[in-house]
């Protein structure tokens, strides 16, 4: 794994007053913390019913940890080492040391002076620390309520999407390659736009998918700034299954983002990949702890399959039954490596999580969903917008990969000369209002 030397620009940071990072740390992150504290407070009776007095004590303890955290965040105090004893605790504390070495005039690593990617990820990991240090409520998912609500409020869109997919499936048997390619492009774009609905960008405010994006795909086309769909298609169709393989097709890995409607769009896309024979297996990668409000964890994944199966809707239920069968047969699998909830840029993965990197090297195609994954792919730095995506990955290329991302942070590369300037003239918030998206691909260069 040779490291690719690229001169790195500074990280996005709240130290730049008025920047999106600054507004996130000043406004949205404290709001999210306050909602978390409120959720724990409103769950006190449940904790009492489940754990008796211990549950009540735990509620008080967690709230005091989180209130202290919110005060430190709002008054730009130094960030503190983690004190729980989890698998990743040491890695987090080493990362903080590394940040400390990078600070000018050895100023302490603090909320408003450090890289945005680090302090935002750190906040979510500190929420988990507060729960783990407050037994017996360590396994309480502070975002579960919001994720469930998002799922139920998106029912109409989910039913419409499942209906559309099941009807497509009936006609897919005799589709020629051109028709199959059109189906793939359509459901790839549905999964792309499914990413608009995340609860972190809205600081937990309702942000539900009200209509099925299938009906609006053509209107949304012009908001796709980079569309490498053809390159993704070429990777999938180039995979030759070994002679005699019991199942044709590629191995595809989906690095998931948000639960709710977005997860359903990912499951539908994965269903198309397997049902069409384009893929022989799909590996889903979720988060091992509650993350960025709406990100998928194992419970969310299993719950969504159970919920769709139990739906009082023919097509939704048929989807759920099929998806549970894929899991049972091992055609689909779910994984949640701790690296996905670390703050590192992805180019650090070979050094920090070599096991995960080699797992991803066994894939034929990696689909990275969402904005936070894009920020980690690019390191959340102030790159020139026209730098090639593969250069900015700086050696992170375990397999051909594609980012399916709606823009919610001011980092974007791989654009044409003049494209960013034109967008900024039309819409000053083009990088952060979630209106624009990319389907951005990179594959190992021949010589690698
Ligand atoms: O707080 C805003 C934000 O942190 C984005 O910058 C971040 O990437 C987003 O929330 C989460 O978006 P997604 O769910 O698409 O990763
Ligand atoms: Mg997310």
Image (cartoon, grey):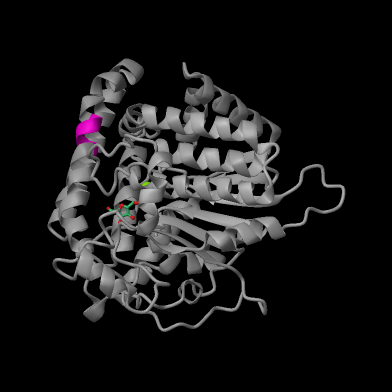
Residue 14 higher or lower than 331, as above or below: below
Number of numbered discs overlaid on the protein picture: 0
Q: Look at 34% across and 71% down and name the residue there.
A: 381
**Viewer-side residue, 421 vs 291:** 421
Q: Residue at x 43, y 47 (%)?
A: 257
- Read off the magenta span: 36-40
Q: Residue at x 53, y 38 (%)?
A: 267
Q: Nearer the viewer, residue 329 or 38?
A: 329
- Looking at this view, name the residue that lies furthest to the right: 244
* Whole-percent x, y for residue 405 in the image: 41, 56
Residue 319 image position (x, y, % from top left) = 56, 28
Which x, y percent locates residue 358? 64, 60
- Residue 342 within the segment the image draws in magenta: no
Considering only vertical position in the picture, is 44 above or below 15?
above
Q: Quadrant of residue 143?
A: top left
Question: Does residue 335 appear in this view?
Answer: yes
In the figure, residue 282 lies in which quadrant?
Answer: top right
Q: Nearer the viewer, residue 38 or 448?
A: 448
User: Is residue 348 left or right of 325 when viewed as pictured?
Assistant: left
Given residues 142 and 317, the one toward you in this image is 317
- Main SS of the magenta part reads helix
Quadrant, the N terminus:
bottom right
Residue under the image location 27 percent in, 39 percent down: 207
Relative horizontal placement of residue 80, taking residue 18 as reference (left or right): right
Residue 136 visible somewhere in the drawing: no
What is the quadrant of the C terminus in the image?
A: bottom right
Residue 157 placed where, x, y %? 39, 32
């Amino acid at each position: 794994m040779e490291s690719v030397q690229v001169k790195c620009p500074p990280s996005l940071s709240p130290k730049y007053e008025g920047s999106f990072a600054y507004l996130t740390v000043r406004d949205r992150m404290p709001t999210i913390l306050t909602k978390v504290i409120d959720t724990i407070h409103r769950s006190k009776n449940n904790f009492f019913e489940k754990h008796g007095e211990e549950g009540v004590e735990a509620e008080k303890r967690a709230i005091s940890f989180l209130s202290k955290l919110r005060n430190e965040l709002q008054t730009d105090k130094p960030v503190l080492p983690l004190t729980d004893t989890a698998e990743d605790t040491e890695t987090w504390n080493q990362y903080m040391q590394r940040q400390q070495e990078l600070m000018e005039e050895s100023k302490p690593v603090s909320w408003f002076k450090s890289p945005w990617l680090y302090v935002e990820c750190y906040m979510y990991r500190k929420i988990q620390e507060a729960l783990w240090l407050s037994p017996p409520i360590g396994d309480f998912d502070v975002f579960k309520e919001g994720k469930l609500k998002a799922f139920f409020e998106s029912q109409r869109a989910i039913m419409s999407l499942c209906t559309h997919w099941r009807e497509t499936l009936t006609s897919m048997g005799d589709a020629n390659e051109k028709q199959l390619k059109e189906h793939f492009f359509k459901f790839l774009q549905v999964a792309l736009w499914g990413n608009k609905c995340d609860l972190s960008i809205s600081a937990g405010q309702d942000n539900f998918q009200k209509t099925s994006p299938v009906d609006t795909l053509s209107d949304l086309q012009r908001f796709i700034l980079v569309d490498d769909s053809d390159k993704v298609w070429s990777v999938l169709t180039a995979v030759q299954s070994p002679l005699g393989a019991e199942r044709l097709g590629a191995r595809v890995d989906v690095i998931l983002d948000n639960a709710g409607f977005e997860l359903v769009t990912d499951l539908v896309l994965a269903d198309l990949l397997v049902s069409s024979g384009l893929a022989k297996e799909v590996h889903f990668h979720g988060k091992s702890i509650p993350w960025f409000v709406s990100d998928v964890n194992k419970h969310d994944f299993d719950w969504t399959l159970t919920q769709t199966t139990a739906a009082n809707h023919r097509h939704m239920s048929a989807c759920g039954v099929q998806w549970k069968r894929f899991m049972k047969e091992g055609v689909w699998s779910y994984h949640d490596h701790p690296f996905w909830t670390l703050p590192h840029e992805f180019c650090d993965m070979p050094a920090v999580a070599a096991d995960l990197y080699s797992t991803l090297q066994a894939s034929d195609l990696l689909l990275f969903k969402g904005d936070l994954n894009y920020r980690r792919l690019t390191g959340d730095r102030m790159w020139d917008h026209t730098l090639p995506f593969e250069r900015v990955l700086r050696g992170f290329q375990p397999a051909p990969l594609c980012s399916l991302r709606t823009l919610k942070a001011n980092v974007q590369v791989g654009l044409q000369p003049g494209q960013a300037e034109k967008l900024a003239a039309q819409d000053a918030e083009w990088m952060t209002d979630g209106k624009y998206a990319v389907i951005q691909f990179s594959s190992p260069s021949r010589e690698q």
